Image (spheres, rainbow, N blue to C red):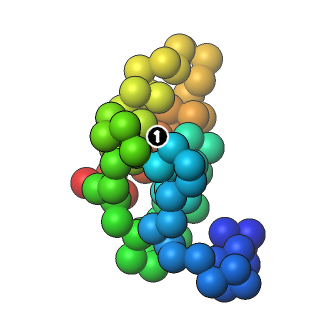
Amino acid sequence: EMVEFIFSRQGESINSQNGIGWTALMFGVQACSPEIVAFLLGHGVDKNLRSKDHKFTAIFIAQNLKATFGPADVEKSQSIDAILRLLE
């Protein structure tokens, strides 16, 4: 709901990038939120945008984040798996 509110009120493009080129989608991935990722994808976000240094896409972030999870991070790992399926 908050993501929807921000985009409806601020008139920002769903593909807006911050100073280093991160998008709302990248932050949704970093937050391990399949709900935010699904919302953004459903509203036409470009999942292939890269950060300004051309190193990061949302998929790259998800894959690298998943690699950092240990056995105790089951819920986060499941969320990232769901995100990766959404980004396919």
Q: Is residue 73 visible?
A: yes
Q: Residues within 10 Å of mark 1 (few under 14, many from 20)?
A: many
Q: Quadrant of residue 18?
A: bottom right
* Residue 49 rendering spot, x and y as whole percentages: 33, 56
* Residue 26 rendering spot, x and y as whole percentages: 49, 49
Q: Tell me what residue is drawn at x 40 percent, y 45 percent.
A: 51
Image quadrant occupied by the N terminus: bottom right
Q: Is residue 15 above or below residue 19?
A: below
Relative placement, left or right, of 10 versus 72 is right
Q: Quadrant of residue 72?
A: top right
Image quadrant occupied by the C terminus: bottom left
Q: Is residue 82 visible?
A: no
* Residue 36 rendering spot, x and y as whole percentages: 57, 61
Q: Tell me what residue is drawn at x 52 percent, y 20 percent.
A: 69
Secondary structure at numbered mark 1: helix
Q: Tell me what residue is drawn at x 74 percent, y 69 percent.
A: 2
Q: Is residue 44 above or below residue 84?
A: below
Relative placement, left or right, of 75 versus 21 is right
Quickly name the residue at label 1: 80
The residue under label 1 is which amino acid type?
Answer: Ile
Could you say which is closer to the camera, residue 8 or residue 73?
8
Q: Tell me what residue is drawn at x 34 percent, y 65 percent.
A: 46
Q: Residue furthest left?
A: 88
Give the number of marks.
1
* Residue 87 rendering spot, x and y as whole percentages: 33, 55
Q: Is residue 11 above or below residue 65?
A: below
Relative placement, left or right, of 18 versus 42 is right
Q: Is residue 13 above or below residue 71?
A: below
